[in-house]
Amino acid sequence: MTMKLDKFCLVAAIAALLALIFPLSGIDGDTGKQVAFVGDIPGLAIAMALCVIAGAAFTWLGVRSVKAGIVILAVAVFGCWQAVSVLYDHGVAGYAGLGFWLFILSLWAFVWRGIDVIANFHSLDRGKQHLANVIVPVAFGVWLLFVWEVVVSGFGVPQVLLPPPSMIGERFVNSTDILASDFHQTFVKAVLSGYVMGCGSAFIVAIAVDRVPFLKRGLLPLGNMVSALPIIGVAPIMVMWFGFDWQSKAAVIVIMTFFPMLVNTVTGLNAAGKLEKDLMATYASGYWSTLFRLRLPAAMPFVFNALKINSTLALIGAIVAEFFGTPIVGMGFRISTEVGRMNIDMVWAEIALAALAGTAFYGAVAYIERKATSWHPSFRVRRH
Amino acid sequence: MTLKQVVNNVAEMPASKKAVVDIKKLSLTFQTADGPVYALSDVDLTIEEGDFVSFIGPSGCGKTTLLRVIADLEQATGGDISINGVSPHEAREQRAYGYVFQAPALLPWRSIERNVTLPLEIMEISKEERIKRAQEALKLVELNGFEKKFPWQLSGGMQQRASIARALSFDADLLLMDEPFGALDEIVRDHLNEQLLKLWARTNKTVAFVTHSIPEAVYLSTKIVVMSPRPGRIIDVIETDFPKDRTLDIRETPEFLEIAHRVREGLRAGHSNDD
């Protein structure tokens, strides 16, 4: 068997070796000297040396097992810790030099290889497989946050343009009471009520449309028109109609969520096959009996599609609608005012909250879908 | 089987039986953009109580359409048809028949048991009674033990048996079957044919069975209706007198081969008219 070199580990080893040679940081304008040297920072020196050794070793050995993947990931984690500490404890932030970026390149190669190995892990043991399936996106997400952190700090990007995630995180943790009240106003009051009203009314209208043929011809095109209305235009009108509080936001959400739900449910109600409808006819099953026993269950995959689409639409709608008038609380309100006050970290904290809330909402709907339509081919549990 | 036995068997049958399906001068024309399609033309047929009637013919001969007219899934455009003395629509409202389709048509969100109890649920029968009847129906098709499985967890043959159990569950006297075993392989089909015959012999139901297999038609039936296409019509009705407890072995007997030959001749004659 011919020996095949592991390219990623080779890149990691060479980049780490060069990182030891090239200057770690740029020159301070005031003192005219380099800010920091690898030789002065034993932790970083050890991390770089470890990268060289591990990189060289695994270039020859290859990363063939999950254990090897975990080893290189552990080396990378140690390296990341040292890199962050150099930035903040040794004044390299804003002055990062070629040596520093070569070190980051080395870490990138390790992380790529390590995640790759775990992503390709297949096991019949469900627990292990599940763990691997969770580790991959988490590790990838953490790595992206790390890159964001070091790039923003290393290049000294102004905080107004893009604050580092650590700063956003700090602001998030220190403003939980404000975030909680914003979340309550925007999500609990506006989004949930608007979502339930929008999806619920569209569902009922869809059944009416199905029952009464002229509605199908008359109402569907009208619904299409309503869905095409620009939210920016509708939101101020809703604020005038329903006042500054959450009711106007819920109204915007109803307008946004109504049409996707209507169209999907109407489509879903026609999803039952001709054979199944004939079957119900042979039992002399009435309209409502056929609706509940055949057509609605068959429509569920479509209904859940709309519920998932609407879960994210609703949050966007509420936040944008708050730009047009709101009591002095709410996620959209906070974003628009804190931008004006140049508190960009607070804006990002709200964005993070919106992302978390949106993902959790979507996830919850997807989970219910999985439970409710487990019979659907896309969810069927393997039977062996 | 000796001739004497066959004769005895015929002699045992009651002289005049009740007509379950009575069709006179029935015709059905579909209006399409390309002009009228004569699906059925001038069909006369009587199915008596306890009969096992097979409809055989090439595709497009209207055999499925005829079954669907009996089931009130299509409406005839001419002639008379009565089921148990009433119109097909009334018969359907009275749940006078169980229908087995070409595909199992089981609802994927219901377990096998809940699929079988579906008609009973629609007929508003109590839950205990539903479960009891589902058990009996599943036993008849040898599917007991699979109550909690879902349709996609069963093989094609088992799914079709489950759909037969569903048609049996409400104990209608008339069973309409539209090529129920058409999609199954020869061995499974033989096995299900045997089971179906046993079931028919035991329950004394009236069966109307659409097929395009000559051996299947001859093996199962008391009456074989040979049909021909364009326009769909009956060209021959062959009565057979094999005993109710026949086995697959009869397929080797001269009587069987003779009837199969007659069916084949009929089919061929129907085709030659066409060319």
Image (cartoon, rainbow, N blue to C red):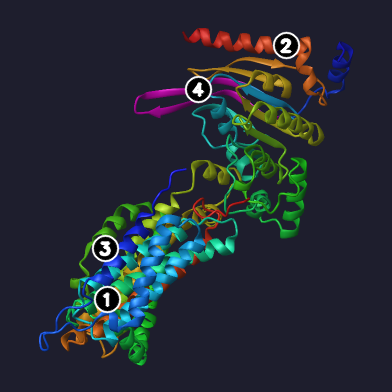
Question: Judging from the image, what secondary structure is the residue with disc 1 in?
Answer: helix
On the image, the x and y values in percent for residue A145 come to 32, 74
- Identify the residue at image location x=52%, y=58%: A373
Question: Judging from the image, what secondary structure is the residue with disc 4 in?
Answer: loop
- Identify the residue at image location x=40%, y=24%: B36
Name which residue type carries label 3.
Answer: Ser
Q: Kindly identify which residue carries mark 1.
A: A150
Question: Judging from the image, what secondary structure is the residue with disc 3 in?
Answer: helix
Q: Kindly identify which residue carries mark 4.
A: B60
- Residue A99 visible from this viewpoint: yes
- Residue A200 visible from this viewpoint: no
Q: Residue A215 appears in which quarter of the rendering?
A: bottom left
Side of B187 where A364 appears, left or right: left
On the image, the x and y values in percent for residue A16 come to 31, 67
Name which residue type carries label 2.
Answer: Leu
Region in magenta? B20-44
Q: Residue A238 appears in which quarter of the rendering?
A: bottom left
State how far apart marks 3 and 4 are (Cα).
Answer: 47 Å
Q: Nearer the viewer, residue A72 or A54?
A: A54
Q: In the picture shown, does residue A271 fall above or below B80?
A: below
